[in-house]
Amino acid sequence: MNDSVDRFPIGFAVGTGQDRRLGAVRRTALRSCLGPGPDFDGGGMKRLVLVLALFACLPAQAEPTGRWWSGFGQGNLEYGIKNDSAGSDEFYIACMQDRTYISLRIGGVEPKQGQSAIVTIGPDEFEVQLGKDGYVETASHVGYDTFRAWWAAMRAGANMRVRLSTGQSTNFTLKGAAKILPRDACETDFQR
């Protein structure tokens, strides 16, 4: 083959003479496997490979980083924010049909049952004991009151600082939280 041939990852060769005939054989073989499709000439194939390479380079993540998001996964409402794409700092609210809780991950550490967390939003400070699975639970009257006050503070505040009893801490922006979190908080376990 001569040096003017462009090589593509899926085995197409585009050039002149013998190389072009070899490319035609490969295109015919590809069409027999995939069925009719676009003409895989040199320019079209280069564009196709470029587009596929760009999609392969894009990060695949469900939630954005640095801003509040909401979703409806497997029949559950969920809200949250991640500070980085690795998810080492994450604040997650699950509003399920049978359970409502808040999950925290700070510096890659998920707290354990019995540990505490202090959340500061403006002048408001919330100290919570982490229950089952290390989550902030909402089954008690105190959990219900704390969850509702916390929810209102997140909608109105600008910044939220979370400190775990293990020493890890981080700040989450609350910019955009009022647009994501509905005015009325999720139904808590205490209300069920």
Image: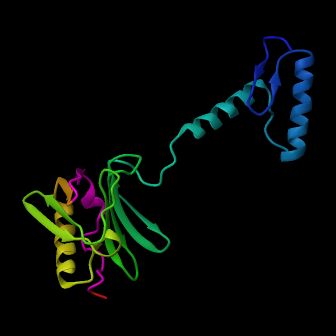
Is residue 185 magenta-colored?
yes
Number of marks in the image? Answer: 0
Q: Judge left or right: residue 81 versus residue 159.
A: right
Is residue 170 magenta-colored?
yes
Which residue occupies the extreme bottom position in the image? 192
Q: Is residue 47 above or below residue 93?
A: above
Image quarter (top left, top right, bottom left or bottom right) of the C terminus: bottom left
Image quarter (top left, top right, bottom left or bottom right) of the N terminus: top right
Residue 146 visible to an observer of this rendering = yes
Residue 35 visible to an observer of this rendering = no
Q: Nearer the viewer, residue 73 or 38?
A: 73
Which residue occupies the extreme left position in the image? 123
Stretch of the chain drawn in magenta = 166-190
Colour scheme in use: rainbow
In the rendered image, residue 40, in percent from the top left (x then y), is placed at 80, 32
Which residue occupies the extreme top position in the image? 3
Q: Residue at x 21, y 57 (%)?
A: 162
The prevailing secondary structure element of the residues shown in magenta is loop
Q: Nearer the viewer, residue 137 or 29?
A: 137
In the rendered image, residue 8, in percent from the top left (x then y), is placed at 74, 27
Quadrant of residue 138 within the rendered picture: bottom left
Q: Residue at x 79, y 16 (%)?
A: 5
Quadrant of residue 47 within the rendered picture: top right
Q: Judge left or right: residue 72 versus residue 24.
A: left
In the rendered image, residue 97, in percent from the top left (x then y), is placed at 40, 81
Q: Residue at x 81, y 29 (%)?
A: 12
Q: Is residue 89 above or below residue 45?
A: below
Q: Residue at x 19, y 84 (%)?
A: 141
